[in-house]
Image (spheres, rainbow, N blue to C red):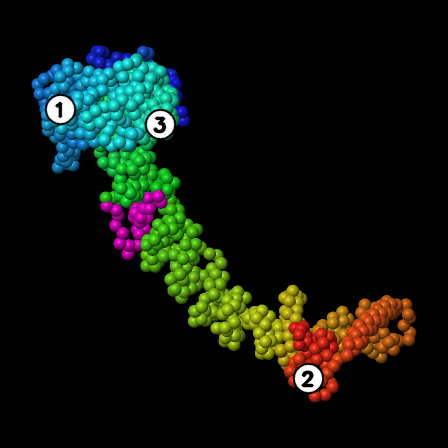
Amino acid sequence: MSIRGGRRRSVVLRGGPPRDGKRRRGRTEPLGELRSQPGAGAGRGRVAAESGLWGRGRVCGDPAVPGLGSWLSRSCVQLAGRRRAAERGSVWSGADQGGLVDHLREMMNIKAFRLVSAIERELLMGDKDHINIECIECCGKNLYVGTNECFIYHFLLEENISPTGKVTFSATKQRHKYLGFKKPVNELKAASALNRLLVLCDNTIALVNMINLEPIPSGARIKGAVTFALNENPVSGDPFCVEVCIISVKRRTIQMFMVYEDRVQIVKEVSTPEQPFAVAVDGHFLCLALTTQYIILNYNTGTSQDLFPYCSEERQPIVKRIGRQEFLLAGPGGLGMFATVDGISQRAPVHWSENVIGAAICFPYVIALDDEFITVHSMLDQQQKQTLPFKEGHILQDFEGRVIVATSKGVYILVPLPLERQIQDLLASRRVDEALVLAKGARRNIPKEKFQVMYRRILQQAGFIQFAQLQFLEAKELFRSGQLDVRELISLYPFLLPTTSSFTRSHPPLHEYADLNQLTQGDQEKMTKCKRFLMSYLNEVRSTEVANGYKEDIDTALLKLYAETDHESLLDLLVTENSCLLTDSVAWLEKHKKYFALGLLYHYNGQDAAAVQLWVNIVNGEIHDSTRADLYEYIVDFLTYCLDQELVWKYAEWVLQKSEEVGVQIFTKRPLEEQQKDIFNPDDIINCLKRYPNSIIKYLEHLVVDRKVQKEEYHTHLAILYLEKVLQQKPSANGNCAELTETQAKLRNLLQKSDLYRVHCLIDKIQGTSLYMESAILHGKLEKHDRALHILVHELKDFSAAKDYCLWISQGKDPLYRQQLFHMLLSVYLKPGPSDCDLVLAAVDLLNQHATEFDAAQVLQLVPDTWSVQLLAPFLTRAMRESLHTKRMTQAALGLAKSENLLYKHDKIKLKGNPVRLSDRNLCQICESPFCEPVFVRYPNGGVVHTHCAAKKHTNPHSSSPGSRT
């Protein structure tokens, strides 16, 4: 986005005088109402809370830190932008003030920096109160201080670690140098590559030796400089020179110099549209604070880019290079604005005070100084992280990661606390988002391996914080991203980890809770929610890499949760691949009376006998478990696919006693490959089923009908059982007609389709019964068709069945066989004897409906002379049509045969037209032997072979197609 100036709505203070009614020295801003006004200041700057204790004495802490006592006594809270108020507003409520104090405490708990004294006042100036610090420069351990009396002091800084782990500094004065002017030293810049210190004093930049502070012998200097900046991204490529940009005393002029060890050289002079007040350099780009605006200027091309306006009369401009082609500027409305050389901002602005004096960068923080405070903002989320009281400060600079702040009398260093400690402080305050943002930003400052370990742990800690707040979705993502050892989470739930687990919690701990009871304070609703979350989380991770090595712990915990909460997924867990620990799981399932599930667990662990016995006890009512209402059917199905023959035989009697029809399925529905191998001997099964008539019929049907076993014994046995059942049901058929019809239909179907049963044995059993149809079928199997037809016509009097008998018997036979059967049936109808009108009608219907099945000439000889032509008209008509059709088809076939014969004759004549010369030199093309007699076979292609060779070969010697004409 392009940076442009504009008016903002800001939070400011309005209020009355202090509580004691007395005016205090300096600016006083009591608690008041927050009001929003256009252009009134920073939206997230400072709110001063006045408690009535306005003393300036130092209270606790480091007495060398200016303003610390005032800060503690006045309880100033930095929350939103602070401006002088011209209007009076309403007073805040007590609740508002309480919230303000709570925020103060929270903010004070997060410390990014600690303010440490670097140079004591006595070391710098002794008892000379008139000496003031004007500028500082730090290069490695070398600290340079410029004063108002034109002195440069050189100190050597040593960093020390106290026994408590705190960083302290000790400064050793090396030397000092008077420059000979009666003007203050305005700026100091070190050029370590040249061993030179650039000193701005009295509008002149002099070069002095960094070690002895002596001016260089050549006396090279730059005159007419108001302020200057070094190019930290030089374009010359010469390692033995420094590029310097100065704001010249000449109006609206910028000059670029090359500074060498003993000389200086002007490179460029550029005019600006307004008088510049501050400058920072990056490559060919200058970031300038002019009278009314900030601009980016390319001094090589002369092109410029306006950024946003500001008023140099109202506030001091700040222009600071913070990285390659990026600058930090003090913008309008108390904003710290980031700008690139392209005139855009890649970061959101930070909100600081409107009267900022200086700014520094210590990644990932932006540090700002005003007349009372040092504020710390994150570059990652733009949030204010820390406020340090610091009065009378006027210098804030960073030197290669070291941040130095100074008053006119002393020098202090902002020592950054380790990022891990800062992150832990944020986590301790439940500020999860801020902690994660800071952790991500720390990646650039920490080795990759160490960062990954640290970041995973932070994610895990953050996950437990979210979990404790019942923010389960956020917790889950953090746990997964942090690759949490899932046992850390399971261990919060009492008794869920297996008793054999050797898991111990992480040290230092990831959270502060002993178990779920402590976390939820005994709230059952919260505990239920936590258990639901754990079930969901474990179910998701159990099939991922997270579960590697911990599958037993995860599945056992999941089983316990499912059983305890009566969750429907318990059975799904147990019927799929799982690693539930048997000993723990058995006790838990028994405790919660999940006996069916316990049976599944036994089965998964190869203990089928224990599983079936448990289920049988449930069905018998010895133990109670209502998980499955169809448990008996489930047991039958289980035994059907069980490979343990001994177990199947053990419970076969039990399942058959419960239900013959269902129980027999343990034999009839076994896997196909098992049936093909006859693992269970059918004879053994039949012997077992003798006491269960319905079951044995079902099993024999399975053998004969389904498996189509071609064994006379089974077919005969099944037919006899059918027959006996039909005979038993006949007397009481009035009440069981449907069952009788079904059994009898099965008997007839078996008698018709099977050729393996013993016919005579069945005929003997049927004699003397009313099973005429079955008797007819059996006589038909013996080819006694006249007897069969007689039974159907005269005893059963079912003429349709007689006709169907003829069709059934003649299936697959030649038409003459069928014709004989129909003539036989007609003879039965027309047999001499007492005239029966029904038989006559049946004979007429048979002729008229199946005219094509009869020989018309024979029929005319059989029918009585008394029958009229009209009675047989349909038969005669169809017979004539069939006769004519047969005649015409025969004529057509004869014509086709004659045509084909004519073609053969034509080919033969063509072949005879060419003479065949045969001598003893000609060889048979099949056996390659000479011809001994003038008898041969000639192929259409001219090949000549012996007659006996042609009879054997039946193929053309030069053709792969058989049967070529000769």
Q: Are marks 3 and 2 in contact (CB under 8 Å)?
A: no
Closer to us: 766 or 279: 279
Q: Earlier in the sequence, mark 3 or mark 2?
A: 3
Q: Quadrant of residue 865?
A: bottom right
Question: Which label belongs to residue 214?
Answer: 1
Question: Which label belongs to residue 340?
Answer: 3
Residue 277 horizontal/vertical position (percent): 29, 17
User: The residue tagged with tag 3: helix, strand or loop?
Assistant: strand
Q: Is residue 489 magenta-colored?
A: yes
Residue 826 horizontal/vertical position (percent): 81, 75
Alpha carbons under labels 1 and 2: distance apart: 131 Å
Q: Nearer the viewer, mark 1 or mark 2?
A: 2
Task: Say if 574 sits above or below 966 in the image.
Answer: above
Q: Nearer the viewer, mark 3 or mark 2?
A: 2
| Residue 179 visible here | yes
Three-letter amino acid code of the residue under disc 2: Arg
